[in-house]
Amino acid sequence: MNPPVDGPLTLTARALNAAGSSSPLDGADAFKDATAPSLTVTEPEDGVVVELSAVTVKGTCTDAHLQSFTIDGEETPRDGNGAFEKAVFLSGGAWGTWIEAVAEDEYRNVTVVTRTVEVAPLEVQITSPQDGQVLDATSVTVTGTVRGPRDAEVFVNGQRAERNGESFSLANLPLTEGPNILTAHAQPPGDSAESVISVIRDTTNPAVTIEVPDSTDIFDALSVDVAGRVDDPTVQSVTVNGVEAHVYNLYGDLHGTYFVAVAVPLSADGACELVAEATDAAGHTGSGSVTVTRDTLPPELAITSPEDGSTVYHTPIAVSGTVWDATLYDVRVNRLKAVIADGTFTVAEVPLPLDGLNAVVAVARDSVGRQTTRWITVNRKLAPSVTVLDVVSSSRSTDGLAKVKIFGTVDHAAGICGRNETHPSYKDGTLPVANQVSGTMQGTGLSSVDSSTLPRMPSMCL
Ligand SMILES: [Ca+2]
Ligand SMILES: [Ca+2]
């Protein structure tokens, strides 16, 4: 007997006994359905990789006695021709999404069609600015690439970026001075990706302070070590008078950077300016300076007045000259302190204690213990000082000469003579030297004393 075909049936039964008698045929209507539903999925293809986070599942499902049709467990409507269309959200990742369509008829015939769909891997990457880049601006345009679902939006630091194909861009993202974290975040349904970089905004010049040495410092040396502080988020280099300094941070404090420059030359004795200049990663520069004193030489000293070996006719005398030193402390002449001004020194009254040669010694000292000595000799030749106390006239002598007798005092005289200017015929005379003199002047014994040093005698009427 052939098996019955699908369709309506009438099932009949008849009983037979051993004698060959049979009962009347008795039957009932029935229906045979051994054919599973017809299910065709036209989209998507199995194993396809899509750039969307959702995929449309399309196809047709027909059966004369369909009881249910589900996609991923959800009852899915069909049109009159059995066509269906349903959006299924996909999960990201390489393993893909398993889509299962199940059709079952009233007679428990089941048809299952499955599809595996993979979403293109989600990738987001900031390409500009660069990680660690220093930006001399208050805002930045962030651009990058995004691959994967075409509908994945990108947010940079929470702000929605413009997406154009595989590129995204966000303009004018504000930056704070110093380090800034930039995060590009893409999160289509079921997936997420992030790109994080750090940039540094630096719009300021470095602030530089020299802490050592101090402006009051004096160096008996040709060079000096210079240390200080530079405040800037991106210090790149520090030089002091062109000498490269070592730059280092303490405690990782980006804003507190220290520098030390070793053996910075001091160019010459006198004031030396030390200039520390810092450059940051954005190309800004800043500087700080201090002026110190170098003193490696003894004072320069010369006596210019009086001339060495000169003769003077009085005491005390003024002594002056020129002096220079980076740290001049004092100048003394024969132990008397000089007045110093504009590179000159002067002692107004230097006593010359000796008749004849006297030493005049000038000593200049500096603040680091060096000294310079210069000396000259001065020939003292003093003019006599005569004080006439009384003059006594005498009668004419037998030789026709008048004689006077004078009384007085005299200092420093090698000789003394008198002259009557009213009566030139009255001759000069000499007297022996003494502090207290009394003698007779007459027309004999003419003076051998330099006439320019002679004291004037009082006029006398004979
Ligand atoms: Ca800076
Ligand atoms: Ca000196």
Image (cartoon, rainbow, N blue to C red):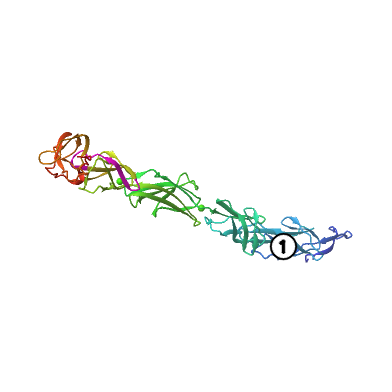
Residue 268 in picture, x, y percent from top left:
33, 51
In the rendered structure, the answer to whether residue 24 lies left or right of residue 420 reads right
Q: Range of the magenta residues?
A: 341-359
For the residue marked with disc 1, what is the amino acid? Val
Q: Quadrant of residue 408?
A: top left
Residue 379 makes an appearance in the image: no
Q: Please, what is the dominant secondary structure of the magenta stretch?
A: strand
What is the quadrant of the C terminus in the image? Answer: top left
Magenta stretch containing residue 343, yes or no?
A: yes
Q: Nearer the viewer, residue 23 or 46?
A: 46
Q: Which residue is mark 1?
A: 57
Residue 74 makes an appearance in the image: yes
Compared to residue 339, the image places residue 23 above or below, namely below
Residue sitting farthest toward the right? 24
Q: Quadrant of residue 449?
A: top left
Q: Nearer the viewer, residue 151 or 3?
A: 151
Q: Quadrant of residue 109?
A: bottom right
Magenta stretch containing residue 183, yes or no?
A: no
Residue 1 in picture, x, y percent from top left:
78, 66
Compared to residue 426, the image places residue 32 above or below, namely below
Q: Nearer the viewer, residue 360 or 260?
A: 360
In the rendered structure, the answer to whether residue 297 lies left or right of residue 152 reads left
